Amino acid sequence: MKKILILLFLLPAGVLADDLNGADTAWILTSTALVLLMILPGLALFYGGLVRSKNILSILMQCFSIAGIVSILWLVAGYSIAFADGNLYFGSLSKFMLSGVTEDSLHGNIPEGLFALFQMTFAIITPALIIGSFAERMKFSAVLLFSGIWVLLVYAPIAHWVWGGGWLQQMGVLDFAGGLVVHITAGVSALVAAIVLGPRVGFPSKPMPPHNMTMTITGAGMLWIGWFGFNGGSALAANSDAAMAMLATHISAAAAAMSWMFYEWIKFGKPTALGTVTGMVAGLGTITPASGFVGPAGALVIGILAGLICFNAVIFVKQKFKIDDSLDVFPVHGIGGMLGVLLAGVFASSELGLFSGHGLPAGLTIASQLGIQALAVLAVGVYAAVATFIILKIVGLITGLRVSKEEEQQGLDLISHEEKGYNL
């Protein structure tokens, strides 16, 4: 009897629980917590340090409130739109209020409730990324209304296109952890929002440096750590795909941080902490769609290119077009996401020697896969841009978008929340 009990204990968890895999479940539980760590406090601190001191609480409050609102909307309809059976463009509402999601229901070999929760954290961080583009000037009520509508009308449908059985997934697009679903949607929407709202008072002639780089670097470190759950967890299993995704993620982040730092050092004479951590974030965003498909050498190239291209994109957007994307959401996440989606179609190939990845879908060449990737970038970018413009116009009619010039100069902390981040 003792030997039988020992053998049962050693059996894989799936054998004992109707195909529920204990190891995979434990890993996705951990990954979910890591992704939430990216948002609260990671992104909140990263963004918070980048704004002026009179707006620090507004950024923290926006991140915190978006986490709450999106969580509720994901429960009500977001998950159903993204992952319930429907057509090629939109999920049905059969999972309304997570109907049918019970302790016993599974998604693959993990609890469906856990899958819904893991995907919820992705839905939270995406609109939270966008707030960096209109930081320091958008009404709090407008931020909340915009974020809620945007998640249901932009994020959830595109998640269905790519991950929920939609038309891009049917075409064979490669997006392991959200280059299309997260970074391109957030980046393009951020650019539209920055243009619609217009620049902050004093931009571009008045310097607006970060008020607390220590806070920003602390948040950046949390993003780096949390991204292991973001990309590694997207394997939805504790397996070699998750391990390679984490390795590729780390290499790309390191390479992008260094390529940005050295490029800045050569161009301007000194490396900055702000540039180095921004490069790291660019590397993380760029590797996201490719992380589960490429090898370490491919990840190195992706990271180096991410640092160089996103660096120049920041300069181009702010200096060439004079667009006040306050915290560089489009050049870092939008351009990085586009670059990563395209490069996934190259470095996923198993025919590149040292730079080979896991292999392209059967019957596809690098050229044909690149065509699919490019079409996906275009479709997602156009849909996100048009939908975001419409949502902003609707929100503007309901609440107005911007605070007044006088309120902006006083700071959103006092105007929106009657509080100060610092009482010195």
Image: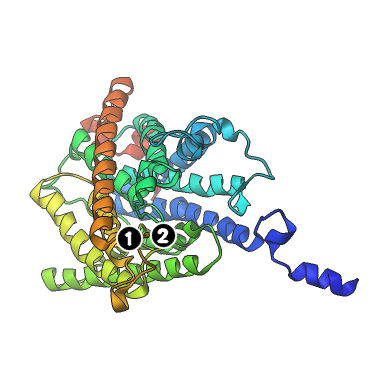
The structure residue drawn at horizontal position 37% and vertical position 34%, both measured from the top left corner, is 150
In this view of the protein, which residue sits in the foreground, 177 or 375?
375
Q: Which residue is mark 2?
A: 223
Q: Is residue 419 visible?
A: no
Residue 206 in the image: state x and y as whole percent.
Answer: 14, 48
Examine the image and state in which quarter residue 46 appears: bottom left
Q: Is residue 293 visible?
A: yes
As drawn, 398 above or below 367: above
- Disc assigned to residue 160: none
In this view of the protein, which residue sits in the foreground, 375 or 193?
375
CA distance separating discs 1 and 2 = 8 Å
Which numbered disc, 1 or 2, marks the residue that appears first in the sequence?
Answer: 2
Would you say 258 lies left or right of 218 here? Answer: left
In the rendered image, the residue lying farthest to the left is 320
The structure residue drawn at horizontal position 34% and vertical position 33%, both measured from the top left corner, is 415
Q: Are marks 1 and 2 in contact (CB under 8 Å)?
A: yes
Would you say 208 lies left or right of 42 here? Answer: left
In the rendered image, the residue lying farthest to the right is 1
Residue 104 in the image: state x and y as whole percent.
Answer: 69, 45
Residue 333 in the image: state x and y as whole percent.
Answer: 29, 53
Q: Which residue is mark 1?
A: 281
Task: Check disc 2: other Cα within 10 Å, few if <14, some if 14-19, many if 20+.
Answer: many
Q: What amino acid is labelled 1 in the image?
A: Val
As drawn, 318 above or below 395: below
